[in-house]
Image: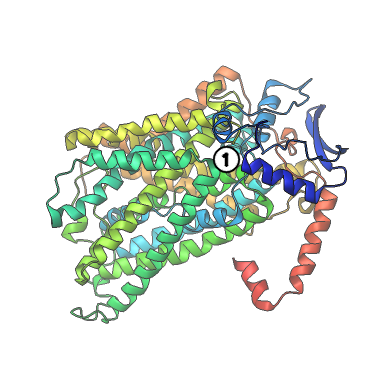
Amino acid sequence: MHLLNANAETMRQDALENFAEPLVYMSRACQVHGKQHVCTMTEEKTHSLSPNDSVSSGIGEIKTTSKWRNFVDSFKEADLHDVDTEGMTELEISQLKAANSPLQRSLKDRHVKMIAIGGSIGTGLFVGSGGALAQGGPAALLIAYTLVGSLLFCTINSLGELAVAFPVSGAFATFSSNFIDPAWGFAMGWNYTLNWFITFPLELVAASITVDLWREFNNSNISPAAWVAIFYVAIVSINFFGAKGYGEAEFIFSIIKVVAVVGFILFSLILVCGGVPGNGYIGGKHFHDPGAFANSFKGVAATFINAAFAFGGTELVGLAAAETENPRRAIPSATKQVFWRCFIFYFLSLLFIGLIVPYNSPELLAQGSVLGSASPFVIAIKNAGVKGLPSVMNVVIMVAVLSVGNSAIYGCSRTVAALAAQGMAPKIFGYIDRTGRPLVGIIACSIFGLLAFVCAAPKEVENEVFFWLLSVAGLSGTFTWGSVNLCHIRWRLAIKKQGRELKREVTFKSRVGIWGSIYSFVFCIVILAFQFWVALFPVGGADPTPRVFFQAYLCVPVILVFYFVYKIWKRTKIWKLADINLDVGRREFDYDALQRQLEAEKIEMATRPWYVRWGNYWC
């Protein structure tokens, strides 16, 4: 007689203890009434569990006789529940598939919170801020990052409202299809996928470059390709553990990054005030010499673009909603963390960077690769003359780079799987196994990551390859944020147009409302305009050339080609507000019961101490 594996046995025992009576559960029936896709909840009962019953382990029932058999079966395609699609259009069916993805809901609240706090802290902050400081100066650095931070805060609030209401796979790409135009959803989905395709090998190369700091001490001649191979295996392995593996890794990576940034801020405060032996009082002298601004207003405009790149990846919180156990609780809390991250980890750290490192520092201006200038964080610590700390900071940067690489595979695989579910990518990319892993998407991104081994080629070849790859996805984040805000605007307008109540439809309401989305949407257009100006007339007075322009702005025509080709091919139309489906993709349908639960939670919170209420409001 075969034995059940340990996990299944534990689940079976728990079920027997807790469900001696007949099981009662809610099943969702989905049908089409007119143009509206309506889902209803019905109560069903099953027989009592007996000791001989087997228990499903989650997505797609897996009955195993050994750990090896369980492991092999986990790679089989998930069993999809049958849904009545009679009378539905091709578009409605694709929307339903995206809404009922078999991705596993294994991300916990703590995972989502740490992804929001530190998930996107990477090369954009630790390395890219050096190029921004050199181009714009310390004052421009603070202005740009503060304003882009306000844009991001509004965007994540808008995304949070949508993600709680519609925790679907593909998040913003799916939202674009449902609220704007399927063709725009196609363009945004592939734009975002390409962004992460390109980011993965770039981050692998960046991680190998961080090792170069130690060459000065041990004269090592190890090829960068060797380090790329090590980092490649580590990141790919993490993602084969599924969403839970990604979440646990990001939880650890984010803690390391947060502790490091807080430590850097405290160290910098002591250094600026003259508390580090061998260093006098620094204060704000670098704001006077060499100055607060570099390259006048054009330098400020260029810094906005760097800031947008640095904040990229924050929107992964919305993408993770489809794999979160309880998005109604996790996502609102995560959106609140964005404010603190923008203020503490970006504004304060960059304030001290501007105070400690002059924008004309020779090390800061040393360009040599597509990754740009040296890290101003490492430069600041080296200038203080504290031995050992530069190496510690370098390790943190390496962890941050690996974190972004880990997010790249996660974001890419989930987005391309959602595109496949909607018929916007080859069907094979929609393969999701029984443990909820989009296997083909993970493998595809992993294969693209092999481009990182171009680091073994001459430096000129490496730079040329990555400069052109980055040009395809350089403005991806700005387009994604703009689309999220436009989706939120149209979602709110559609609720009003269709005569529904906002209070009844929205369980988590954006703190900045529709006006915050309008502000952020306009700001995204301003950033694109700044990039066009800087691409046409480069900072520093360099002669404008087609090569320089397209390396900075190629992303825009690529997105437009995606949009118009799909629009002509599928003959899609921009949704009228009255025709937008406000039901497909929802996880909770009993609005009255939900409102009663929300009111009960408010009453319960009102009885808590003031500091608990304060913490709940802000964190």
Q: Residue at x 16, y 34 (%)?
A: 458
In the rendered image, residue 579, in percent from the top left (x then y), is placed at 74, 32
In the rendered image, residue 436, in percent from the top left (x then y), is placed at 59, 36
In the image, is residue 270 above or below residue 84?
below
In the image, 225 versus 86, the foreground residue is: 225
Instruction: Kindly state the secondary structure of the residue where label 1 is placed.
Output: helix
Asked which quadrant contains residue 535, the reply is: top left
- Image quarter of the N terminus: top right
In the rendered image, residue 252, in percent from the top left (x then y), is placed at 46, 56
Figure disc tally: 1
Question: Which residue is labeled 1 in the image?
Answer: 172
Q: Residue at x 31, y 32 (%)?
A: 451
Q: Is residue 396 left or right of residue 214?
A: right
View extreme (left): residue: 219
Q: Is residue 89 left or right of residue 347?
A: right
Residue 545 seen by the camera: no
Q: Residue at x 52, y 62 (%)?
A: 339
In the image, 25 versus 133, the foreground residue is: 25
